[in-house]
Image: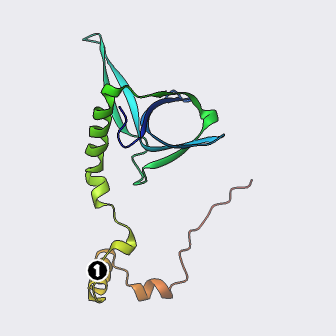
Amino acid sequence: MLINNESYIVLKLSTGEQLMGILEQEDATHIQILDPMIIRTIPVLSEGREHVTAHPYCQFTGDNVFDIEKRNVIFIKPLLATMIPHYLRIVKEHEKSPALQTQKRAEDLDWGDGDEAIRRIQMLENVTGISVEEKEESEGWFIEGNDTKH
């Protein structure tokens, strides 16, 4: 089942991690994957089965395209057609993650005519007890060392 001619794949890395995603591009040395999800299995010993979870491959970035060197890939296989709707649902759920929704780039912030920026700087000065002028005038911090010899 291909949606918009996309190639849904599952791959295993030399680290043992299994990913599912959309194969964007491939050349002689690299593959490019869109929205890779890492698949983890957690054994449930009391029930004698495994629990399968899927999360974004790297949760600490808003970027959803990854280039992976082929030398780190053990295999690439097509994702089962029955798994594609589940994969798409997981991707959509993680796109709505509060961490991604609150992530803004500096150029996306609206400071208005500058009064808002000044107000926020004053708030930070009140919290830290250091004014911007004091910080700019100081030569820095001096931290006394010890007599360690290398």
Please identify the quarter of the rendering in which residue 39 is found: top left
In terms of depth relative to the viewer, which is nearer, 111 or 138?
111
**Residue lying at 32% horizontally and 28% vertically, measured from the top left:** 83
- Left or right of 112 in this view: 39: right
Please identify the quarter of the rendering in which residue 7 is found: top left
Image location of residue 76, percent across then percent down = 52, 29
Q: Secondary structure at mark 1?
A: helix
Depicted 19 relative to depicted 43: above or below = below
**Residue lying at 33% horizontally and 75% vertically, measured from the top left:** 128
**Residue lying at 43% horizontally and 53% vertically, measured from the top left:** 63
Image location of residue 75, percent across then percent down = 55, 26
Q: Residue furthest right?
A: 150
- Left or right of 25 in this view: 5: left
Crowd class of label 1 (few under 14; some 14 to 19; many from 20; radius 10 Å): few
- Left or right of 89 in this view: 25: right
Q: Residue furthest front?
A: 5
In terms of depth relative to the viewer, which is nearer, 75 or 126?
75
Residue 18 visible in rendering: no
Please identify the quarter of the rendering in which residue 31 is found: top right
Q: Name the amino acid, label 1.
A: Arg
In terms of depth relative to the viewer, which is nearer, 120 or 88?
88
Dividing the image into 4 quarters, which one contains the N terminus? top left
Depicted 30 relative to depicted 85: above or below = below
Q: Give the tally of numbered discs.
A: 1
Residue 26 visible in rendering: yes
Reading the image, the residue beneath label 1 is: 120
Image location of residue 144, percent across then percent down = 58, 68
**Residue lying at 30% horizontally and 39% vertically, measured from the top left:** 88
Image location of residue 92, percent across then percent down = 27, 45
Depicted 27 relative to depicted 143: above or below = above
